[in-house]
Amino acid sequence: MTGLGTIVNAGAVIAGGVAGTLLRSGIPEKYKKIVMQGIGLSVLFIGISGTIKEMITIVNGNKLDRQFVMLMIFSLVIGGLLGEFLKIEKRLENVGIWFQSKIPSKGGSFSDGFVTASLVYCVGAMAIVGSLEDGLSGNPSTLFAKSILDGVSAVIFAATLGIGVAFSALPVFIYQGGITLLAGLLQPWLTETVISQMSLVGGILIFAIGINLLEIKKINVGNLLPSIFIPVLYYLISTAFH
């Protein structure tokens, strides 16, 4: 069922947000820290496994070989330069500031919880890649994994920011559902190879998100988001000259 991943993801955010609100009386800081580290490690290895899955292939019966390496490098470099030129990371931050200014505070931190959680769950490679995979191949596995991560983190966010976190399920549903529907319309132009290449780049960006969550080094993943779509551009250009 196309779109199931987004439905499950939105439900997980609601459940986690409600549970966290009920637990708001206090979760010790040391437990919050270890849970966030667990989430970071999970994202890290989801990215690694996704990258290896698309990059490594078996040839001659039992030998391992790499594929799409040059296109991967090209996509990250060109996509990163494009994202830096467009200042995607900064623009996303500005959208968050604008969004927060439009939502009045109602007796507490409702708007803070709503805006913070919405940005965390919507602005990320897993949301884009997972929605594309769901729309293109009906595979919601990435969004299912994201649902677990979002549901657990929603408990932590809501424990400190309140019930507004649970309401962030609405923009999650609209944003990811919209990408899924658009991906379905584009399906005739996206071959299995192109999807694999996009997933490869997406896996690397998921890995980068894990690095950010673990606070190893700050990577501007937002500026690298155009990299996911470079394989499509490469396919269109290459077919035009054949």
Image (spheres, rainbow, N blue to C red):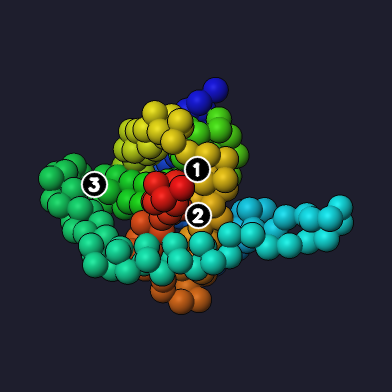
- Name the residue tied to disc 1: 130
Label 2 sits on what residue type? Gly
Label 1 sits on what residue type? Gly
Closer to us: 4 or 226: 226
Image coordinates for residue 128, horizontal then vertical, percent: 42, 46
Image coordinates for residue 188, horizontal then vertical, percent: 45, 30
Q: Is residue 90 left or right of residue 185?
A: left
Label 3 sits on what residue type? Ser
Looking at the rendered structure, which numbered label has been put on residue 111? 3
- Name the residue tied to disc 2: 202
- CB contact under 8 Å: marks 2 and 1: no
- Location of the N terminus by quadrant is top right
Closer to us: 23 or 229: 229
Image coordinates for residue 66, horizontal then vertical, percent: 68, 63
Which label's residue is closer to the chain start, 3 or 2?
A: 3
Q: Residue at the location (52% across, 63% down)? A: 72
